[in-house]
Amino acid sequence: MEAGTEARRVASVMHVRCPDRLPEDVYRQVLEQLAELSPVVQALPPTAALVELKGALRYHGVDARRLGEVLRVRTISRLGVDVRVGIGPTVTVAATASGQITGPGGVLAVDPGQVTDWLGPLPVEALHGIGPRQAQTLRDYGVHCVGLLAAIPPATVQRLLGGRAGRQAADRARGIDPRPVAPRALPASASVSRAFPRHTLDGAAVRAALLDLVVTLAAQLRGRGQAARGLTLALRFAGGTTWEMTRRLPEASAHDDDLRTLAYRLIDAAGLQRGRLTGITLKGEDLVGAGQVAEQISFDGAREARLVAEEVSDRIRARFGPGAIRPATTLLRVS
């Protein structure tokens, strides 16, 4: 057993892969499920994460494989999302293991004593951290599996792949990876998107979709106890071109009124004329806790009435679902 593996006698690193194209809000909920297992979670956006389970194994009194199975049950039952969970003594082994799960979900655990035998037969491109160009270079020299890579003197691998990349590849092929799981939360943002079933030139339809996104994003922020300091509007056009702009709010907010006003300014700035839209995304940027936002005294009776209605709407959605209330089309007229 190599020195790097000796340092870790327990497979305590979990690498989690979510489905591709998972919405950001659902990805955040998966991270919350991970945090229930261990406080040491490293987000790897857009769809992966690392978890250090050392303390969690002692706390829960089960092995890492069991915690991986618990995670799958929770994400499926609570979020409707299956995940692929790789577990190993190092980041490289755990991430390589999760990549070897062929189904939509599953758990694959590699014990420290099995690392060399398990890695050996894998193709070099399966080793986490080996990119397509590096894999092709190794194959050109007849190194087609991880076991052969591990058998080559590190100096030779360095000549093939370059100094630092070669050292890392040689070490990781032997199961050596001293990197710790570094706790890191997902950047403070939240986004909602809408894809148009047909390319649209209808300005009213675009504004209706934008208003729906505003209401959805605002409700999401309020439900999470957050407020946005800025908004980003991204438009996707037929042919694959995109347009994006970010602007700051005067004050951090999660209220429909404030987000709608800025969102309409952003769509006006896009100067849409004959552009055929295929999709639209609205993102709340630089999020802060709602408790950090000072509520300003307002003498605008109409606004105060709308805020009261907003609270009622939130309670109705919480009870009957997010689609219980939809924006009124009359709100599309902007003064």
Image (spheres, helix red, strand yellow):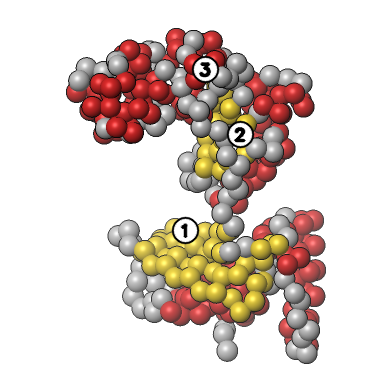
Could you tell me the amino acid type at mark 1?
Ala
Q: Which residue is mark 3?
A: 5
Label 2, on which residue?
51
- Viewer-nearest of labels 3 and 2? 3
Considering only order in the chain, which callout, 2 or 3, is on the residue closer to the N terminus?
Answer: 3
- Decide if residue 6 is on the left or right side of residue 306: left
Question: Horizontal and vertical percent for residue 160?
Answer: 23, 27
Q: Tag 3: Cα neighbours inside 10 Å, few (<14), some, or many (≥20)?
A: many
Tell me if residue 296 comes above or below residue 35 in the rendering.
below
Q: Tell me the kind of residue under disc 3.
A: Thr
Residue 180 vs residue 253: left or right? left
- The correct choice, above or below, for 235 with respect to 73 in the image is below
The amino acid pointed to by label 2 is Val
Task: Please tell me whether residue 71 is drawn above or below residue 284 in the rendered image.
Answer: above
Q: Which mark is residue 195?
A: 1
Is residue 121 among what the camera can see? yes
Near-viewer residue (90 or 209):
90
Question: Could you say which is closer to the camera, residue 212 or residue 44?
Answer: 44
